[in-house]
Image: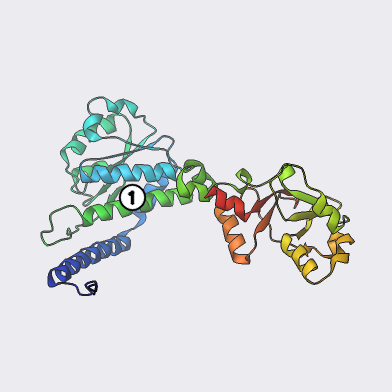
Amino acid sequence: MSSLPNQFISVSELDQLRAARDIVRHEAQTLLDLSKRLDSTFCMAVDKIVNCQGMVVVTGMGKAGLIGQKVTATFSSTGTRAMFLHPSEAIHGDLGCLSSHDIALALSNSGETEEIRRLIPSLQQAGVSIIAVTAKAGSTLGRAADPALELGSIREAGPLGLAPSATTTAMLALCDALALVVSQQRGFTRQQFALYHPGGSLGQQLTAVSEIMRQGRHVRIAPETATVREALVNRSPGARRTGAVMIVDADGRLCGFFTDSDLARLLGTRREHELDLPIAAVMTREPYTIAPAATISDAISVLSAHHISELPVVDAEGRPVGMIDITDLIDWK
């Protein structure tokens, strides 16, 4: 007889889980407390970055530097030109990348990090204004900055309360808020986000419908005066098979849709004689459509919500320019 899997948690595992949950709760509470302390100083920082004519140059040492590298990536991917400047490398030649149009976003919990303190006079001499993220606005970094975003006094998580944990979590959250609010103020769009994220599953979901839709000889378009038989027979040789026909009026605007399912219903109810009637008599009027600038994610949502397999793509005037078939999305994935 095979033994049953252990369904019980040992005392030592319970202790580990209790400690882990305490740490997560501690950091979560830190973020809640920080959110309540945000004030007009944060808005000053947002306005300063929105109006920046240069780059946001992020700098920090140690754990703050690691947070800075992530924040740099967040700024860059959400429409704000940014770069990370290592404070030690900066004073050994990398200061040459700066211009007076730039803004330095300096991260230091204590505000007294030696490498950051040494960097401040050089930033000021280069005419680079400083935004600080630090625990105390009265620190060396805080006094040099305008504005200084104050994290406040934060107790680190864990039994020792020594390793940077709650402070780095707070620093990351505050900088994320800064980057994303700046992006919102600039009117950054999903289409722009897709432009910066062409790879991976995220890039695929944000790809425009126009990039993968069937068009030209790969779609069927028929006038509303054509018979069902004529519309179905009219297919370019060698084109990918599609069972849907987009029906247009005299002005070329989409006025209906006819699919394999519609044909199956005619045959299943012994209405073969209607194959020689104008397709307008049996087509689906006012079908669901999508714009060519919409994303793949939008197309999937429409297909899924309405349980359909084909989706006409129309321009701003309602004229068909292509079609999305559910199989196209499977191939894309």
In which quadrant of the rendered image does the N terminus lie?
bottom left
Numbered circles on residues, count: 1
Comparing 172 with 54, the one in front is: 172
Question: Is residue 65 in sight in this rendering?
Answer: yes
Comparing 206 with 68, the one in front is: 206
Is residue 283 depicted above or below 322 in this figure? Answer: below
Q: How is the image coloured?
A: rainbow
Q: Residue at x 15, y 38 (%)?
A: 114
Q: Residue at x 58, y 47 (%)?
A: 208
Is residue 207 depicted above or below 276 in this figure? Answer: above
Q: Residues within 10 Å of mark 1 (few under 14, many from 20)?
A: many
Instruction: State the SS at label 1.
Output: helix
* Percent of width and height locating residue 18: 18, 69
For badge 1, the amino acid type reads Cys
* Percent of width and height locating residue 74: 38, 46
Comparing 293 with 39, the one in front is: 293
Q: Residue at x 22, y 67 (%)?
A: 21
Question: Is residue 146 in sight in this rendering?
Answer: no
The residue where tag 1 is placed is 175
